[in-house]
Amino acid sequence: MAMDAATIERLIREGLPDAQVTIEDLRGDGDHYAAHVVSAAFKGKSRVQQHNSSIRRFAVAWETSSMRWRCRRARRKIERKKT
């Protein structure tokens, strides 16, 4: 079962109360989202640390291993770009 955009935004804001959050439904199917998050908490952190700060709240909410797999894949992409 997919999470809706409002739930994604709420989970991010719970972990980063000052965040400016924009959620985009990438395919219009309510199952593939991109989140753009701006927060003062990111200052001085690497992109990987910023990503982890944003997604930490999802650990309990995620119900399928495929969602966790996609998250790990995205993290690897960020790490590759950094090097």
Image (cartoon, rainbow, N blue to C red):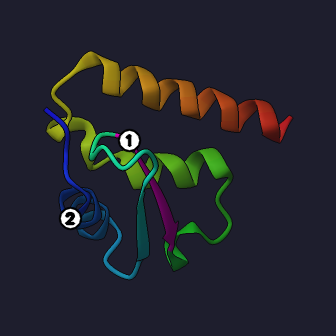
Quarter of the rendering occupied by the C terminus = top right
Q: For residue 36: magenta?
A: yes
Q: Where on the picture, by quarter, is residue 77?
A: top right
Q: Is residue 75 above or below residue 50?
A: above
Can you give x and y, in whole percent of width and height, for residue 44 in the image?
68, 66
Report if the CB atoms under discs 1 and 2 are less than 8 Å apart.
no
> What residue is shown at x 20% (from left), y 64% (from top)?
6
What amino acid is labelled 1 in the image? His
Please give the range of residues in magenta. Answer: 32-38
Q: Main secondary structure of the magenta part?
A: strand
Q: CA distance from mark 1 to mark 2?
A: 13 Å
> SS at mark 2?
helix
Residue at the disc numbered 1: 32
Q: Where on the picture, by quarter, is residue 78?
A: top right
What amino acid is labelled 2 in the image? Ala
The answer to whether residue 10 is left or right of residue 23 is: left
Q: Please give the label number shown on residue 78.
A: none
Can you give x and y, in whole percent of width and height, for residue 52 in the image?
47, 46
> What residue is shown at x 16% (from left), y 40% (from top)?
61
Number of marks in the rendered image: 2
The answer to whether residue 6 is left or right of residue 47 is: left
Can you give x and y, in whole percent of width and height, for residue 22 in the image?
43, 71
> What residue is shown at x 44% (from left), y 26% (from top)?
70
Q: Is residue 44 above or below residue 76?
A: below
Residue at the disc numbered 2: 6
